[in-house]
Amino acid sequence: MEKQLYYDYPYVKEFDARVLSSEKRGKFYETVLDRTAFYPEGGGQPADGGILDGKTVLDVQERDGRIFHRTAEPLTAGSLVHGAIDWEKRFSLTQEHSGEHIVSGLIHRAYGYNNVGYHMGEEIQLDLDGVLTWEQLLEIEHQANEIIWKNVPLHIWYPSPEELRSIDYRSKKELTGTVRLVEIPGADVCACCGTHVERTGEIGLVKFMSMIHYKGGVRIMMLCGRKAVRAFDEKLDSTREICTLLSAKPGESAEAVRRLWEEGKEKDLAIGELTRELFRLKAMAIPGGQKVLVDTESGFSAVEIRKFCDYLMQEKKAEVVCILRKNGEGKNASLGYCIGSLSRNLRNAAGELNRELHGRGGGSPQMIQGSFSADEDKVREVLSARFAGGEADQGD
Ligand SMILES: [Zn+2]
C-alpha cells in the first residue's frame, strides 16, 4: 500500500508524490499516488478535500488496499505532483473525531453503553444503545471538557496480537490483522483508523446540542472545537437580535417572550369579543328566514368568514348561508367561500358547485370551505338554482 502520510505525519498539509495511475471510472478520474496525505473516507470520518496537481479533489476512497483520489480531469501517470489538503476541513474533522472518542469512551465507562451509529455532518450524530437523561449527558460533557483542558497527549499504537488480547478496548466489529489503537488517557481506548489530535487541548470544546430517544437508546447531536465556537456566535447573534426586538436586557429574553405571549393571549381574547360584537351588529341588518343568503365580507380572514357563516346559521338567517371574501387581484382573483347549512347536505353538493363555479374545496355535510373562480352574481345564481327550490331534495 502507498504511504499514508496522514498517519505518520498527521499535521502534513502539503506534500509531493508520484502518480502511479490515473484512470477514468464513471464520470470522474481516479488517481493512485505512491504516498498521500489525503485521508480516505473511513471509520465514520468523511474524506479530505483539497487540491492535487491544480485539480480539485472531489472525493477520496479506499478500495482493495489502495487509495483513489477522484478528480474531474486526469493526472499524468509517472509525473510528480503537489497536493494540498483542505486543512480547515480536516482539522475540524480531527477535532470532532477525537472529541467523539472522549464522549463515547466516558459514556461507555460510566454506563456501559455502546456507540452504535456515528455520522459526521454539520453536527456530529451519535447513537447509543442505552438511555441517558440530559443531566447525565451534561455531566459527561463537563468531564469531557475537563480532559480537553488538561491537554493530555493521545497515545496511538499498533499492539502485537498477544498484547492486544490483554487490552480492554472499544471496537465496532471483530478485528483481524493489524489493529490501530487510540488511547485518550482518562477517557477511552478504541480501535480506530481516523485522524486524531496530538493533545486533547486542540479539541477546544465539546458541546451537546440536543438529544432524542432513538431505537431503544438515544441519538445525541454534538459539536466540537471550531464548529462549537461558530454555533455559539450564531446563537449569541440570534439572542442579541431577539433582545433588541423585545427591548429586553441580555439574558432576559425568555422573560420578555413570556410577557409578549401573555399580552398576545389577552389581545386574542379582546379581539374575540370584538369580533362577536361585530358579527352581532352585522347580523342585525340581515333579515332572517331566507332560503339562500350570500354575503361578501372581504375584510374578513378565511377563519373569520367561517365563524361568521356559523354565527348566521345559528341565528337562522337562512337555510343556506354563503360568506365570500375576495382573494388576490386581476387574473389571479378568486372568491374564498364558506357555505353552511343546518338542513341541507353540503358535502354532497360540493362537487357540483365547484364544477359550475370553477372552484375547489370541501368539508362536512354542514359546512364546506374553499374558493370559486367566479363573480358574486354567478355564485348567487348557482346557489339559488341549487337550494332555493323548496324542500331539501334526496341528494342533499
Ligand atoms: Zn474513531
Image (spheres, rainbow, N blue to C red):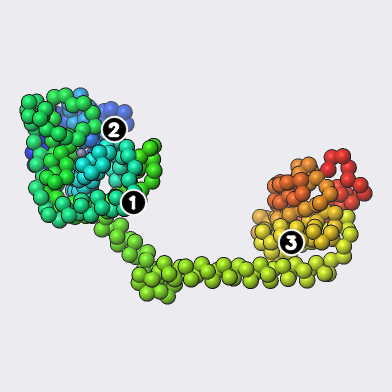
What amino acid is at disc 3?
Answer: Phe
What amino acid is at disc 2?
Answer: Phe
- Residue at 12% of width from left, 54% of height from top? 150
Q: Is residue 377 left or right of residue 85?
A: right
Q: Secondary structure at mark 3?
A: helix
**Residue 3 position within the rendered picture, expressed as x and y whole percent measured from the top left:** 10, 33
Ligand 1 occupies quarter: top left
Q: Nearer the viewer, residue 37 or 294?
A: 294
- Residue identified by numbered label 1: 134
What amino acid is at disc 1?
Answer: Trp
The reply to whether callout 3 and callout 2 are in contact (CB within 8 Å) is no
Q: Secondary structure at mark 1?
A: helix
Q: Secondary structure at mark 2?
A: strand
Q: Nearer the viewer, residue 74 or 332?
A: 332
Mark 1 vs mark 3: which is more N-terminal? 1
Q: Is residue 112 left or right of residue 335?
A: left
**Residue 118 position within the rendered picture, expressed as x and y whole percent measured from the top left:** 29, 39
- Residue identified by numbered label 2: 28
- Res. 308 mark: 3
Which mark lies nearer to you, 2 or 1? 1
Mark 2 vs mark 1: which is more N-terminal? 2
Q: Is residue 8 left or right of residue 294?
A: left
C-alpha gap between disc 2 and disc 1: 46 Å
**Residue 251 position within the rendered picture, expressed as x and y whole percent measured from the top left:** 35, 70
